[in-house]
Image: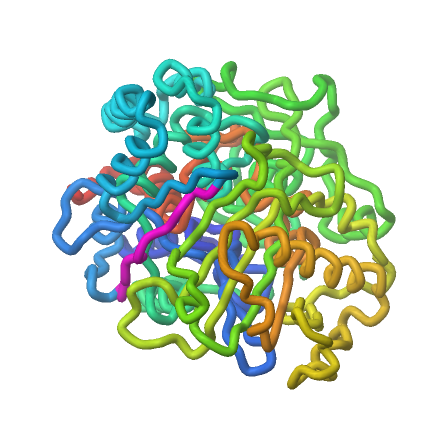
Amino acid sequence: MPHFDAIIIGAGMSGLAAGIRLAMYDKKVVVLERHYVWGGLNSFYQFQGHQFDVGLHAMTNYAVKGAKGLPLSRLLKQLRIRHDELDLHEQGFSAVSFPGVKLKFSNDFNLLRSEVSRAFPQQIDGFDALTKAVREFNELDLDAPQQDARPVVRRFITDPMLEDMIFCPLMFYGSAREHDMDWDQFVVMFKSIFFEGFSRPQQGVRHILKLLIDRYRKAGGELRLKTGAARILHENGRAAGVELDNGQALTADTVLSSAGLVETGRLAGSAGLRSNDPNEASLRSEGPAGVVDVPSTTGADRMSTRQAGQRPALPKVGERPVLPGKLSFTETISVLDCPAKQLGIEETIVFFSNRERFNYEQPADDVDTSSGVICMPGNFRLPDEPKDHLVRITNIANYDRWAALGSAGFQPAPGSAGLRPALAVDVSSTAGADRMSAPNAGETPALPYYAAKQRWYERSCADVLSHIADFRPHVKLVDMFTPRTIRHYTGHEGGAVYGSPRKLRTGQTGIDGLYIIGTDQGFLGIIGAALSGISMANRWVLQREGVSEPAA
């Protein structure tokens, strides 16, 4: 039976970074990935000759070469990666756009401050005091008590619209909670977006993933693709390894799981997750108490339960159930016949709301197109003009409604939208319309699902036109993914991109040797996810063996 120093579940950013960190110190480590490609929430695929990123709009936490003490600097130091290897190019400028008000911001924080002073002159002193509080808060103190962010922000900001305009980008890029955020996560996102800012490699997320994969393999780590974890093995409160989908057992001293808090609890079986985190009492549960622990099952048992349309009982942390996150998304991808700037679209990213009060919650309908994120990847300061000119629109969506659409025979696949462009002219006269008017073969049995995608693609495009110029006549190819796509490729219950509303910042699950990394550990974004994997690998494996961390 193969034995490892560490088994890592999931080849996303946190899993790969943890693997690199451990392999650098000659640990025998294996990363398990159920799918055929690595990346998790941030991956890529090819559709009709075009390369598309999934998840990544931008890398947050930008830092110039040589900067000290910033998250990106710490990441580079820990993984021994040179700044130049990332090939990062900064945004031009982005914006938060609400009815009658637009705030521009860039990687120079002074632009946002001047915009707040212009649009909300009576709020600028409070805004300065808020930014001071953000700078002084140590979000890296994993043992600090948690508190809600909105009450803290309201000590400084009294205008409800400005409050919502500040929260809008932070929530769309990292909040698993409806309506509010934890203060520590607010600070993380505020610093990463407003203080540090956005950048992107010329080749998008595939460049970052290739860099991490190459570094991991060079360090001696093992990667197993198309290898899912069916069960986490443990005995007498101690993790022992992982049983794979094919029934093979791998043993290990430590298991690091990026599968998510709910998902890891189900893999762990009847023991549930009973955190040793001293701040566990402050962690929120948004559901009723008294839900029983999930029974111990094999992977085959769980698969048959899901196929029958039943959900296993929820795992618990402490004495309370851990509910899946409610926040999932759709994303439409429109390929244009010209650069967005030629249409008068100058922003790199626009966070928008069509209402004065921003509503961040699971919608009652399939999609809430009244708010979202619009990304023009070609508007980063790239050295070369990109091959494809894209407009990407992200909206909050309801997983349960999408899951109920034409479920018989559904087999999601990247590039499976088969949608018609939302043009201002008859699509039958548009080049390629015949090719794009029929759904992909993988979706043929699920016609209601396909029809819903067509309807919501058109609605999503129409509802951004008060924030950017009408790009629809220039669309030549489209694609779209939904919460079902997210669920299929990430394994996250409910297609919850940011996982459970409850986070285990120390990573402790109550099963010794089993630790949470990634989204549900609480570090957000690509840089945050990678630092999550690194910090948990350091804390629970390397430091226990006396390995010191290099200073950032």
30 left or right, relative to 419: left
Farthest residue to the left: give it: 66
**Can residue 429 be found in the magenta stretch?**
no
Reply above or below: 541 against 160. Answer: below
376 left or right, relative to 489: left
Residue 81 image-quadrant placement: bottom left
Which residues are the magenta region? 86-97
Of 540 and 330, the residue lying toward us: 330
Picture coordinates of residue 498, whole percent (x, y): 54, 42
Residue found at x 74% / y 75%: 440
Of 489 and 444, the residue lying toward us: 444
Res. 542 visible in picture: yes
Picture coordinates of residue 82, whole percent (x, y): 19, 61
Residue found at x 54% / y 29%: 502
Residue 353 image-quadrant placement: top right
Picture coordinates of residue 298, whole percent (x, y): 73, 48
Of 250 and 301, the residue lying toward us: 301
Residue found at x 78% / y 46%: 401
